[in-house]
Image: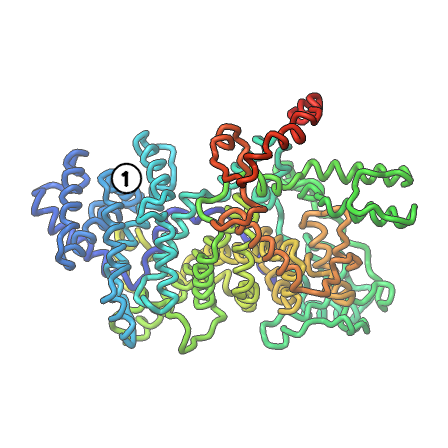
């Protein structure tokens, strides 16, 4: 059965309650009461007969100051109790609340109070101590099985810090002025090298690398990744901030505004019907043979053409990996030409009734994207025209049009108008925007490899291996389940745990790639190349080589156990039916979000890189991507179609003939680039004989750039020139001994006797 249209709105994050609930696993549920008990035990000993929400601002500040002082005790157990009391405050003193909204309200109030009192800095010192705790690391390495108890201190600290980052990051209309000031101060603090000379995000990256090197298997990696993602999102900005940065950059350089906001355009697009499966085509053919005059088989309203096609990639078994070869040109595997059919194709059915004006107005007219053209396209067009009409070429000259017919002049004029209108951000990236405070050094390579290792371990298609990374340390209980119900609950928790890890890594990688590309193109290129060399492309394809519809609609959640619902409402008795029910949504937000992120990462890695596009072909990505088109969500389909478009020229004529509906979808939904013959494969770029030359040339350019800008032992050729007259004249220069005897003769010959062209100097100065 065809899946319904998914009402999904893509954004930086899910709702606040969903993001807060995902920091906790269901195995941690008993610890909510533990946090409350430690808080109330200490609170009642100092404030008798009153509740937290009844205290005034100054009394609350005084109590938080007491907790801050208690964090500095040397006893590890006492510190943990105080940290749990602070966590209870950050969680919104839920025992004093009656509704979920009350918990969110008091959590926000308390988090700003905790930040104002300096709690985050104190927690950071404790976190650094736990990271450097070699005794705990060596103990965890020797353990045969690691459980939730091995990461107790780290989980408490990271949970508080996550609540503070995520709560302060979000801006609401009723924020107080002091909260807005605190948000900006916290944002600056997190992005500055205030923590041992490095930003907070780099400390979290260190935790990821240490965990993946098997030196700290007890680190709660899900919490680390979520906190790392939200820290990057807070300090660097999300998709809207990125768009604003692009707009401001273009305004600063007097460039025309961007033609559109891609995310807004995609939101107005409608999902297309997926390509027909082989079973559907067989049924349609049988109905046509039973009677030529019978009514025409049903055609979907949003189908993209009247043709049917055979889709051999419907099933998820091993046979799906076989792709139509170019040599299979018999027509049996492909689509039957309408002229060769033995049935008469009936005219299309009458159009459906007109929709109300409100619905029609929301649909875009014509193609959704403004067309684009590259300078290379103009050069190629002119070279072809010169060869055809005047018999010789002029290299990279795009200005000389002598000898060419008038229509060619008009075509070049149109191409240049489009080129000027969509002037890419390369000018911004290469010349004008400031660089990050650190070079794109190779030391960060291990961080990206660690993220990919975690992504591989969390992928549902991965099989458990003895040498694989254990990412379940912060979800497995000390005592394994003994009943069927407990096993079901733990199974759901483990699957949910993996999904959240995939969500955090995919969002983090995409955000880093987008910010690096906007900041400097070579930073983006070196990170992209490291990801490619670490097998990111086959890893993402491996992720999608599953029943993607099942992954999108997975119900790995237990609503009654989600925070804050579980701490406010009375817990019902869990049954097998209630565990299997999950939520009522037709899709899982985080899984669809992760799929779109991974597709966007794959697009960024392969765009304009023919060698990487060939990797998509070599790894047989076309059937995998075609299965992903069955998800009827416009944004996901768009990025799948983009990936299919860039490789159609390599897939051969038979594949294009057999997949006309997919080709039509590409034409309708993907941006057009003038002179791009992606559907035919005649472009010279479609024949990359040496796949590695492109990567080697890019790597050489990156290394030269890094050497010029960051290498301390710079060559004289690339050393900066001092043009300041005072500093140049003030330098002490060692002159040869014979210069003192001949300098007067040198002055007469080289200076005084040479006429000075003052007009030329003035013109050069202008």
In this rendering, would 3 be left or right of 342? left
Position of the C terminus, as image quadrant, is top right
Residue 528 position by quadrant: bottom right
**As rendered, which of 610 and 672 lies closer to the eye?**
610
Q: Is residue 243 visible?
A: no
Is residue 422 in sight in this rendering? yes
Give the left or right position of residue 597, taking residue 315 as reference.
left
Q: Residue at x 31, y 45 (%)?
A: 164
**Relative to 557, residue 95 above or below:** above
Foreground residue, 287 or 721? 721
| 359 sits to left or right of 53 | right
Name the spot of residue 709 as percent of width and height, x first: 52, 46
Label 1 sits on a secondary structure element that is: helix
Relative to 533, say whether 175 is above or below.
above
Identify the residue at the far front of this view. Answer: 741
Question: Residue at left 26%, top 45%?
Answer: 121
Front residue of 271/116: it is 116
Question: What colour-coding does the image apply?
Answer: rainbow
Identify the residue under disc 1.
112
Q: Residues within 10 Å of mark 1 (few under 14, many from 20)?
A: some
Q: Position of residue 756 (x, y in %)?
A: 69, 24
Q: Position of residue 664 (x, y in %)?
A: 73, 55
Image quarter where the N terminus lies is bottom right
Observer-nearest of 394 and 269: 394
Q: Position of residue 716 (x, y in %)?
A: 56, 47
């Amino acid at each position: 059965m065809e899946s319904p249209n998914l009402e999904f709105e893509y954004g930086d994050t899910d709702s606040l309650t969903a993001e807060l609930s995902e920091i906790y696993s269901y195995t941690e549920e008993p610890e909510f009461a533990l946090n409350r008990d430690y808080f109330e035990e200490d609170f009642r000993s100092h404030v008798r007969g009153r509740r937290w929400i009844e205290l005034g601002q100054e009394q609350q500040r005084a109590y938080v100051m007491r907790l801050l002082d208690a964090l500095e005790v040397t006893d590890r157990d006492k510190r943990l109790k105080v940290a749990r009391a602070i966590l209870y405050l950050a969680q919104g003193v839920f025992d004093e609340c009656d509704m979920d909204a009350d918990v969110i309200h008091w959590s926000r109030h308390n988090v700003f109070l905790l930040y104002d009192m300096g709690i985050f800095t104190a927690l950071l010192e404790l976190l650094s101590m736990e990271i450097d705790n070699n005794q705990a690391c060596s103990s965890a390495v020797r353990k045969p099985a690691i459980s939730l108890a091995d990461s107790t201190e780290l989980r408490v600290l990271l949970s508080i810090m996550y609540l503070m980052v995520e709560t302060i990051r979000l801006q609401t209309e009723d924020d107080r002025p002091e909260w807005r000031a605190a948000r900006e101060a916290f944002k600056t603090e997190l992005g500055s090298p205030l923590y041992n000379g490095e930003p907070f995000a780099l400390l979290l990256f260190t935790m990821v690398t240490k965990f993946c090197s098997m030196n700290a298997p007890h680190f709660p990696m899900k919490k680390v990744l979520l906190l790392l993602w939200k820290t990057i999102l807070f300090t660097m900005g999300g998709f809207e901030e990125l768009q604003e940065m692009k707009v401001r950059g273009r305004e600063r350089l007097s460039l025309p505004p961007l033609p559109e906001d891609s995310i807004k355009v995609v939101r107005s697009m409608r999902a297309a019907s997926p390509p027909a499966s082989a079973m559907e085509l067989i049924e349609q053919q049988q109905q046509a043979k039973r009677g030529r005059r019978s009514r025409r088989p049903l055609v979907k309203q949003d189908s993209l053409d009247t043709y049917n096609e055979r889709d051999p990639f419907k099933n998820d078994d091993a046979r799906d990996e076989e792709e139509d070869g170019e040599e299979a040109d018999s027509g049996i595997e492909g689509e039957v030409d309408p002229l060769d059919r033995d049935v008469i194709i009936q005219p299309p059915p009458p159009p459906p009734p007109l929709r109300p004006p409100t619905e029609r107005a929301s649909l875009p007219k014509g193609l959704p994207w403004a067309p684009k053209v590259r300078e290379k396209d103009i050069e190629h067009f002119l070279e072809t025209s010169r060869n055809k009409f005047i018999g010789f070429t002029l290299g990279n000259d795009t200005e000389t049009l002598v000898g060419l017919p008038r229509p060619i002049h008009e075509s070049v004029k149109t191409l240049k108008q489009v080129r000027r209108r969509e002037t890419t951000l390369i000018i911004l990236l290469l010349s004008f925007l400031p660089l990050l405070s650190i070079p794109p050094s190779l030391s960060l390579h291990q961080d990206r490899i660690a993220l990919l290792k975690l992504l591989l371990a969390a992928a549902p298609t991965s099989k458990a291996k003895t040498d694989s990374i254990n990412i379940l340390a912060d979800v497995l209980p000390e005592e394994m389940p003994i009943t069927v119900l407990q096993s079901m609950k733990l199974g759901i928790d483990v699957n949910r745990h993996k999904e959240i890890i995939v969500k955090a890594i995919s969002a983090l990688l995409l955000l880093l790639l987008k910010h690096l590309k906007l900041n400097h193109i070579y930073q983006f290129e070196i990170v992209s190349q490291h990801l490619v060399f670490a097998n990111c492309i086959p890893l993402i394809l491996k992720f999608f080589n599953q029943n993607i519809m099942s992954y999108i609609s997975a119900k790995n959640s237990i609503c009654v156990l989600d925070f804050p619902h579980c701490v406010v409402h009375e817990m019902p008795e869990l049954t097998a039916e209630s565990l299997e029910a999950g939520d009522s949504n037709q899709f899982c937000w985080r899984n669809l979000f992760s799929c779109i992120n991974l597709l966007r990462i794959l697009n960024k890695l392969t765009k304009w890189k023919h060698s990487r596009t060939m990797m998509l072909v070599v790894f047989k990505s076309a059937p995998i991507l075609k299965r992903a088109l069955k998800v009827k969500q416009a944004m996901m389909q768009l990025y799948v179609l983009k990936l299919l478009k860039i490789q159609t020229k390599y897939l051969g004529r038979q594949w294009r003939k057999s997949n006309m509906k997919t080709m039509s979808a590409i034409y309708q939904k993907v941006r057009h680039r003038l002179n791009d013959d992606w559907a035919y494969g005649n472009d010279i770029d479609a024949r990359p004989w040496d796949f590695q030359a492109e990567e080697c040339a890019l790597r050489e350019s990156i290394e030269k750039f890094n050497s010029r800008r960051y290498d301390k032992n710079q060559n004289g050729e690339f050393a900066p020139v001092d043009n300041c007259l005072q500093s140049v004249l003030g330098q002490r220069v060692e002159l040869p001994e014979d210069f003192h005897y001949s300098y007067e003769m040198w002055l007469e010959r080289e200076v005084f006797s040479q006429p000075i062209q003052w007009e030329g100097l003035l013109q050069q100065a202008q």
